[in-house]
């Protein structure tokens, strides 16, 4: 079968060689290729050639190796209940692999044509403390970058190095566009980057804090990791071999705070002045349900989110979480319909075309829980409301990070705090009050307030006790009986 390339595929609509590099994207994984690159592709097809994307991988060369032989073209496969449709995206002009030559990436970000540096480096990529949002100055990557900022390794380090280069050359700063699921993501990244910049050079730190725009964004598209079965199915459908297609859903949404001093593409996103209600709706409903489902579902032997939703008791728990616990903490974003959003979410979770593994979503829980479940818990407690479903979600994370499943087999826990979490779990044993207390003491996840709150600790410890003694499935079945 022929390989996807410019010669074999004529449908991408514009000549990638004639694009200017207007955007550098850090973290060129599946999510960016299914989301922002798709929005940008639409702009390029309409003829505005200023916004070609230079991608960068901050760790491994895998994506570059897969896409280089096909001139960075890739297939985007979108599915819903009605089936799957494939398109080719040509918005990515080139990919740099940062560790091979960090200075080359800094120089590329400092080119005058670059107006936007966007990021999808996952929650942990910002080297911050998830509970407070402050830069973690003892993070090994930050320690490295402070000793050699001209050849950085972290995402904040690359932003600082390139902004400093532009500042020195008298070029205007690029706009920093975070597309990760962090609370007030622009502000959070601004705080981290401005702090690192100030540690490098106080005068430059002031420039970053005062002159660089960090608009916040709410990104909403489900993008599971691509599997070999996806590759085979897509090759059959298109007649072209693609080493790394991206699989996603038909649904796509992007809400962006409109602050781009150097200009921006005319993306068909929703541009707003206040992102907070959009972001809370999405992080607490979609991502909150995802995380709670992934821990409970994984422990109950459910491989994918669609499998979780096919389990009537687990689907009931998800409905309860969204309707009876999360919704009361949200304010309706202008023009949005929360009831319709939740109904669409349940359909999206059931999408038979996506094999979104619970194990994948379970990753990096220490970085995800604060914005997905803990903020909702704080708001409900402050309003004197119950938190049973939310507490069960947090308890399931605690049970998961013990690293042993209900059959006694090892769980491949991926989390930057894995070793610390594991050591705490091992020391506490399978005693719910001890295990809960030792994990609640992880301040960068729970802060100081939650461990001191008896409403939270009691609900959470009771849920954890049931998970340990009866297992996940029996626990969410009981939950359905007690919360009909
Ligand atoms: C998921 C998200 O992996 C995860 O943690 O919850 O990647 C989710 O699919 C996206 O945020 C949807 O926009």
Image: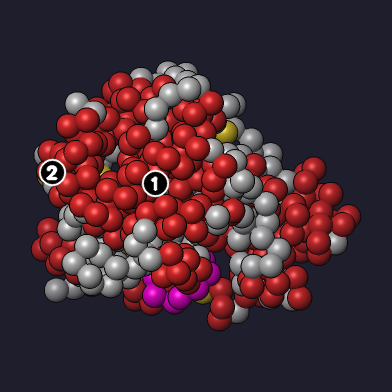
Give residue 461's mark: 1
Could you tell me which residue is drawn at 69 percent across and 39 percent down? 261
Query: Residue 131: x and y, percent?
Result: 59, 48
* Residue that mark 2 sits on: 311
Query: Residue 64: x and y, percent?
Result: 42, 73
Location of residue 474 with respect to 4 vertically, above or below: above
Magenta stretch, residue numbers: 55-63
Query: Residue 83: x and y, percent?
Result: 12, 44
Q: Is mark 2 within 8 Å of ligand 1?
A: no
Location of residue 226 with respect to 284 vertically, above or below: below
Residue 99 horizontal side relative to residue 401, left or right: right
User: In front here: 231 or 235?
Assistant: 231
Could you tell me which residue is drawn at 49 percent across and 54 percent down? 437
Pointer 2 local density, CA inside 10 Å: few below 14, some 14–19, many at least 20: few
Q: How is colour applied across the structure in the image?
A: secondary structure
Location of residue 16 with respect to 448 vertically, above or below: below
Could you tell me which residue is drawn at 29 percent across and 60 percent down? 359
Give residue 403's mark: none
| Residue 142 visible in the snapshot | yes
Q: Quadrant of the N terminus?
A: bottom left
Residue 381 horizontal side relative to residue 82, left or right: right
Closer to the observer: label 1 or label 2?
Answer: 1
């Amino acid at each position: 079968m022929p390989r996807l390339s410019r010669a074999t595929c004529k449908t991408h609509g514009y000549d990638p060689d004639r694009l200017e590099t207007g955007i550098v994207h850090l973290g060129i994984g599946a999510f960016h290729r299914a989301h922002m690159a798709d929005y940008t592709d639409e702009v390029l097809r309409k003829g505005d050639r200023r916004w070609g994307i230079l991608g960068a991988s901050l760790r491994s060369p895998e994506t570059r190796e897969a896409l280089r032989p096909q001139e960075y073209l890739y297939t985007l496969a979108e599915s819903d209940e009605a089936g799957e449709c494939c398109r080719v995206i040509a918005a990515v002009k080139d990919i740099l692999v940062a560790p091979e030559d960090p200075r080359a990436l800094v120089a590329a970000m400092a080119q005058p044509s670059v107006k936007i540096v966007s990021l999808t480096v996952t929650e942990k990529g910002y080297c911050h403390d998830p509970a407070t949002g402050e830069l973690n100055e003892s993070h090994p990557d930050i320690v490295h970058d402070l000793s050699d900022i001209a050849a950085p390794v972290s995402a904040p380090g690359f932003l600082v190095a390139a902004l400093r280069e532009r500042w020195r050359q008298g070029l205007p700063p690029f706009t920093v566009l975070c597309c990760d699921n962090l609370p007030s993501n622009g502000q959070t990244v601004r705080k981290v980057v401005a702090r690192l910049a100030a540690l490098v050079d106080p005068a430059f730190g002031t420039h970053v804090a005062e002159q660089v725009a960090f608009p916040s964004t709410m990104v909403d598209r489900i993008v599971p990791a691509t599997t070999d079965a996806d590759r085979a199915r897509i090759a059959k459908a298109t007649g072209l071999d693609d080493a790394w297609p991206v699989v996603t859903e038909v649904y796509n949404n992007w809400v962006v705070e409109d602050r781009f001093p150097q200009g921006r593409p005319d993306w068909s996103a929703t541009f707003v002045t206040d992102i907070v209600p959009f972001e809370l709706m999405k992080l607490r409903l979609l991502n909150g349900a995802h995380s709670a489902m992934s821990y409970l579902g994984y422990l109950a032997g459910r491989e994918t989110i669609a499998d979780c939703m096919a389990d009537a008791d687990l689907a009931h728990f998800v409905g309860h979480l969204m309707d009876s616990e999360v919704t009361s903490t949200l304010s309706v974003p202008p023009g949005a319909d929360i009831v319709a959003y939740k109904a669409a979410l349940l359909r999206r979770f059931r999408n038979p075309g996506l094999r979104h593994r619970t194990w994948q979503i379970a990753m990096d829980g220490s970085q995800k829980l604060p914005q997905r479940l803990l903020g909702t818990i704080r708001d409900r407690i402050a309003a004197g409301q119950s938190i049973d479903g939310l507490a069960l979600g947090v308890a399931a994370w605690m049970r998961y990070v013990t690293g042993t499943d209900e059959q006694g087999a090892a769980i491949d826990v991926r989390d930057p705090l894995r070793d610390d979490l594991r050591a705490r779990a091992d020391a506490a044993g399978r005693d719910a009050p001890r295990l809960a207390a030792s994990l609640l003491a992880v301040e960068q996840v729970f802060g100081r307030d939650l461990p001191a709150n008896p409403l939270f600790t009691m609900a959470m410890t009771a849920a954890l006790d049931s998970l340990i003694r009866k297992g996940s499935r029996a626990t969410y079945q009981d939950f359905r009986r007690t919360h009909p």
